[in-house]
């Protein structure tokens, strides 16, 4: 495998950028090589380790199951063997006792029965006492190792289970009891084949079963023990536990055995000392006893732990080999990649004359050839680059000139808009005095007509009458001229207003609180200038989060001025109607942030609006003000500005004689939405 970078010198571009390119390449190569090398080594080692861990885990799992099953099987076989021995022990005793129930009860058989009983005690050491009961349930003979023999005591056994159960079932195994609280005993009753033979009751010492249990060896620390049907300990290698009449019924394995649960047989549990053990049991028929064989978990699984340790050593060895092999393979793979990276770094630094030489015969070599082809094409296209840059520069220069021209036009448009606003203001100022001129001119003409009629009744000479008539005609002519030019001036003012309202000015983002505050101040000072003695309480509740809204400030100010002026009018009108009853005119302005919208409220405590007026209040030319005080266009224009121009909403809440509140809701981008035809 060959991998290097060939550099063809002789280019001005290479001479300028070659040294920085090498430095950057060397630094970057070291970092990338380290990362790439570590990645390849880690990948190879991970694959090997995962495979070994999976194999080891499966091997350990199946070994654990097989080992556990084998131990349980061995322990069960030992328990079953012990159970068989105990069963054989009891069966032999039962068989020996059976010989004492062959003779019927007569006075002539008493000596023979006593002889048979003594012989039984000699032959069966486990039997410490034998009592023979006649057919009526009374004791006739008792032979004992521990007490004096008794003949004809007549003790009544007729109601005791030793007699009744034996008669009913031919054999009776009594519960285990402890004599002198030291040795376990069991009562064994056996009835003869005929009723007149009576019942033999033997007291069997179970201490001899300890030999059977002690003979069971399970490993080094394993043990066997026997419990009765109530879960009490009968035999155990530690005889002290037996003598203490230990209750084993609380152990899980004993509970499971007593419940005869084959499907939920406990294999791992705690022993009487609280240590985890592997356990198996076998029942002792027909006594209802159970033989348990247990081995400590640590001892039972010691071979498995050794196997796991060996597997760990193998895994560590394989990990070391995988690491060495990974380093070798990663080194072989990284070298050509580093050469490719170094060449790409030199190309990126501007050295288009260099070429990458990699001879691996795989995809890396093909990628290096593609880099070389790319470098050649870049070198060829570089010659045309300056020409393309010049052409693009000229295009950008022309675009800049076009933008400047458009900017000049926009400035001019703004100037014209400002002029329109100025014209509208002048027109508003001229219109009121012009209306006075037109109105008083008409009145003056009527007065001249009345004057002419009055003069017609006055006695005067012809010359005087002619002078008066001439003066009146001159005045009439002058007034006609005034009316004519007043109407022309009024038409001009109307045209100026129409022209000024063709555009709505610029829309921009403004602080809505500032707009409402400015409108309040303008309306308040305007009202005080128009009406002497005007006064009203202004309340402000501006939400600091209301922020800025994109709108036409001039139009929104017009709406607010109209609503505030109407509020002033209604409040002062209610005060005039109330007289001196302490009513205080009040107007409140509030703003509220609604997320992507903002709310403006204008509320007055004036006369309110009747329902029939509220339904028509936004209609053009509808007004309830006296003639000369309103045109009926204010609310209509305000509605159009809010709804049509700003895509907002305007609503009114009122109670006649109490208050009126206008609520305006504007989108944050009100002007933009309205221009695009959207809805709020």
Image (cartoon, rainbow, N blue to C red):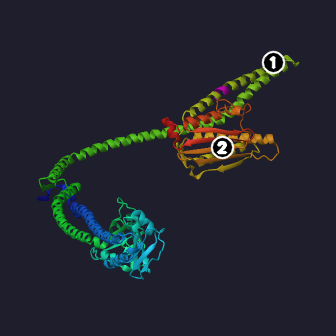
Most extreme residue toward the right is 459
Please, is residue 213 above or below residue 382 in the view? below
Instruction: Name the residue: 28% across, 70% down.
Output: 301
Q: Secondary structure at mark 2?
A: strand
Query: Magenta: predominant secondary structure element?
Result: helix
Q: Which residues are magenta?
A: 485-489
From the image, which quarter does the N terminus lie in?
A: bottom left
Q: Report whether residue 599 is seen.
A: yes
Q: Which residue is mark 1?
A: 466
Graded by Cα atoms within 10 Å as few (under 14), some (14 to 19) or many (20 or more), the crowding at tag 1 reads: few
- Residue 553 seen: no
Q: Residues within 10 Å of mark 2 (few under 14, many from 20)?
A: many
User: Does residue 660 show up magenta in the picture?
Assistant: no
Nearer the observer: mark 1 or 2; the answer is 2
Q: Are marks 1 and 2 in contact (CB under 8 Å)?
A: no
| x and y, in percent, of residue 545 in the image | 56, 51
Mark seen at residue 631? none
Q: Quadrant of residue 179?
A: bottom left
Callout 1 secondary element: helix
Q: Estimate the spatial distance between the alpha carbons at disc 1 and disc 2, rounded to whole Å.
A: 64 Å
Residue located beneath label 2 in the image: 602
Q: Position of residue 82 (x, y in %)?
A: 30, 70
């Amino acid at each position: 495998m060959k991998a290097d970078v060939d550099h063809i010198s002789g280019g001005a571009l290479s001479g300028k950028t070659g040294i920085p390119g090498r430095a950057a390449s060397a630094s970057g190569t070291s970092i990338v090589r380290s990362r790439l090398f570590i990645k390849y080594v880690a990948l190879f080692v991970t694959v090997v380790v995962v495979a070994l861990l999976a194999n080891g885990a499966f091997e350990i799992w199946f070994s654990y199951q097989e080992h556990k099953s084998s131990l349980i099987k061995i322990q069960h076989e030992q328990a079953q063997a012990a159970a068989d021995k105990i069963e054989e022990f009891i069966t032999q005793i039962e068989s020996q006792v059976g010989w004492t129930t062959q003779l019927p009860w007569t006075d002539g058989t008493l000596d023979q029965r006593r002889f048979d009983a003594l012989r039984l005690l000699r032959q069966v050491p486990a039997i410490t006492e034998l009592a023979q009961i006649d057919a009526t349930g009374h004791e006739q003979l008792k032979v004992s190792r521990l007490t004096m023999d008794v003949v004809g005591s007549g003790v009544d056994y007729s109601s005791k289970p030793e007699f009744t159960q034996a008669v009913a079932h031919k054999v009776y195994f009594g519960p285990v009891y402890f004599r002198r609280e030291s040795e376990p005993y069991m009562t064994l009753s056996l009835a003869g084949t005929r009723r007149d033979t009576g019942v033999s009751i033997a007291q069997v010492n179970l201490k001899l079963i300890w030999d059977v249990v002690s003979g069971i060896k399970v490993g080094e620390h394993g043990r066997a023990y026997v419990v009765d049907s109530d879960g009490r300990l009968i035999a155990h290698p530690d005889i002290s536990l037996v003598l203490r009449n230990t209750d084993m019924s609380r152990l899980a394995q004993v509970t499971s055995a007593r419940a005869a649960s084959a499907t939920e047989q406990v294999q791992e549990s705690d022993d009487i000392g609280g240590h985890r053990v592997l356990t198996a049991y076998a029942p002792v028929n027909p006594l209802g006893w159970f033989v348990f064989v247990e081995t400590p978990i640590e001892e039972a699984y010691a071979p498995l732990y050794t196997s796991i340790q060996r597997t760990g050593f193998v895994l560590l060895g394989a990990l070391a080999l995988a690491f060495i092999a990974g380093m070798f393979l990663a080194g072989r793979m990284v070298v050509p990649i580093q050469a490719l990276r170094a060449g790409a770094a030199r190309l990126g630094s501007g050295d288009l004359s260099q070429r990458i030489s990699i001879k691996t015969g795989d995809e890396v070599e093909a990628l290096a050839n593609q880099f070389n082809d790319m470098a050649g094409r870049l070198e060829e296209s570089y010659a045309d680059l300056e020409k393309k840059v010049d052409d693009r520069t000229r295009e950008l220069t022309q675009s800049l000139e076009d933008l400047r021209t458009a900017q000049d036009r926009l400035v001019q448009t703004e100037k014209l808009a400002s002029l329109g606003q100025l014209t509208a203001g002048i027109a508003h100022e001229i219109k009121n005095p012009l209306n006075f001129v037109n109105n008083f001119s008409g009145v003056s003409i009527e007065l001249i007509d009345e004057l002419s009629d009055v003069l017609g009744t006055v006695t005067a000479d012809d010359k005087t009458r002619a002078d008066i008539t001439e003066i009146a005609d001159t005045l009439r002519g002058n007034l006609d001229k005034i009316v004519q030019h007043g109407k022309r001036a009024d038409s001009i003012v109307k045209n100026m207003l129409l022209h000024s309202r063709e555009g709505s000015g610029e829309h921009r983002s403004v602080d809505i609180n500032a707009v409402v505050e400015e409108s309040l101040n303008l309306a308040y000072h305007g009202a005080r200038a128009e009406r002497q003695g005007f006064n009203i309480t202004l309340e402000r509740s501006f939400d600091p989060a209301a922020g800025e809204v994109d709108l036409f400030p001039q139009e929104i100010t017009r709406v607010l001025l109209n609503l505030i002026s109407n509020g002033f009018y209604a409040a002062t009108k209610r005060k005039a109607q109330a007289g001196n009853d302490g009513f205080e005119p009040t107007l409140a302005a509030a703003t509220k942030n609604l997320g992507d919208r903002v709310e403006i409220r204008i509320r007055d405590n004036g006369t309110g609006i009747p329902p029939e007026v509220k339904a028509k209040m936004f209609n053009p030319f509808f007004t309830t003000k006296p003639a000369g005080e309103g045109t009926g266009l204010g609310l209509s224009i305000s509605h159009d500005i809010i709804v049509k121009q700003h895509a907002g909403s305007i609503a009114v809440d009122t109670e006649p004689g109490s208050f009126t509140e206008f609520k305006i809701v504007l989108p944050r981008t009100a002007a933009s939405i309205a221009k695009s035809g959207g809805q709020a």
